[in-house]
Amino acid sequence: MNMINWWNKAKEASLDTGWFPTVILAQWQLETGNFTSSNLHINNNIAGQTWQPYMSESLKGTPRPASEGGFYIKYDDPVAGYVDFILQNGRYADVRCKATEMEQIQAIATAGWAVDPNYANKLVKILSSNQQQGFTLQRAEEESLKLDPGVANTIIHTWIGPAWLQADEAQKECQGDVVTTTKLQEQKVYYNWLANQLRLAAGLPFE
């Protein structure tokens, strides 16, 4: 899975947690070594979440580093597991209330996500690098406003396309009526314009 895919996953997780997708993406990169860690690939664990004795044995993954002790949590899905972990831990409840990326990062570190005293600084460094690559809150907002291509095509093929064809057939049957054929032609032009507006909103080519 490439960075764009993980970026999209981070935006999905953001909707559930209230954490900024840019912060989530940076945390995932730090915890997995840019999505290469054995913890991610073996345990589907994307942010180093630790298994606790009160949890089900089925969630007990591979051992953490000897210096840290314990075990990782093993999930069926890394993103769903990450979201659940955040929502089930009250100590991270205040993170979503922070107004900026830096404040969220500091809150995550302060709440004790990692024992590394430089955890926040490392997240900020990755965040800054990602911003230079275009992974920003502004981009996330712009992408969230983009119409899903599948939705656009469904509307076009289910309603607008048939309406255009109906007008076209009626126009062919009324060739002797100039006023009617003119109105039907205007309808066809409008339907085509409407369909292209949906294509524009979804990033699809005009037709």
Image (tube, rainbow, N blue to C red):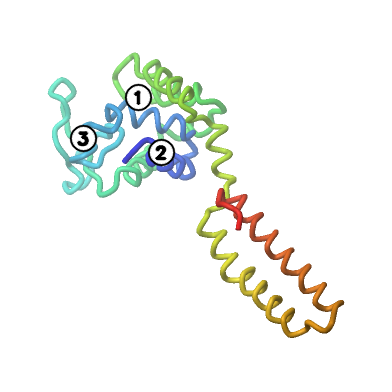
Q: What residue appears at the point 74 percent right and 79 percent down from the top-left corner? A: 171
Name the residue that disc number 2 marks: 4
Mark 3 → mark 2, Cα distance in angstroms = 21 Å
User: Quick check: marks 2 and 1 in contact, CB under 8 Å?
Assistant: no
Give above or below for 120 relative to 42: above
Q: How many marks?
A: 3
Q: Is residue 33 left or right of residue 145?
A: left
Residue type, mark 2 in image: Ile
Quadrant where the C terminus is found in the figure: bottom right
Mark 1 → mark 3, Cα distance in angstroms = 20 Å
Name the residue that disc number 1 marks: 112
Local SS, label 1: loop
First-in-chain label (2 vs 1): 2
Name the residue that disc number 3 marks: 39
Query: Could you say where residue 103 lies in the image, as x and y percent from the top left?
Result: 50, 23
Disc 3 packing (10 Å; few <14; some 14–19; many ≥20) = many
Q: What residue appears at the point 33 percent right and 29 percent down from the top-left corner? A: 29
**Numbered label attached to residue 57:** none
Residue most extreme to the right: 179
Local SS, label 3: helix
Q: Quadrant of residue 193?
A: bottom right
Q: Nearer the viewer, residue 157 or 183?
A: 183
First-in-chain label (3 vs 2): 2
Give above or below for 83 relative to 99: below
Q: Nearer the viewer, residue 47 or 165?
A: 165
Q: What residue appears at the point 22 percent right and 31 percent down from the top-left corner? A: 37
Q: What residue appears at the point 48 percent right and 22 percent down from the top-left corner? A: 132
Disc 1 packing (10 Å; few <14; some 14–19; many ≥20) = few
Give above or below for 93 relative to 58: above
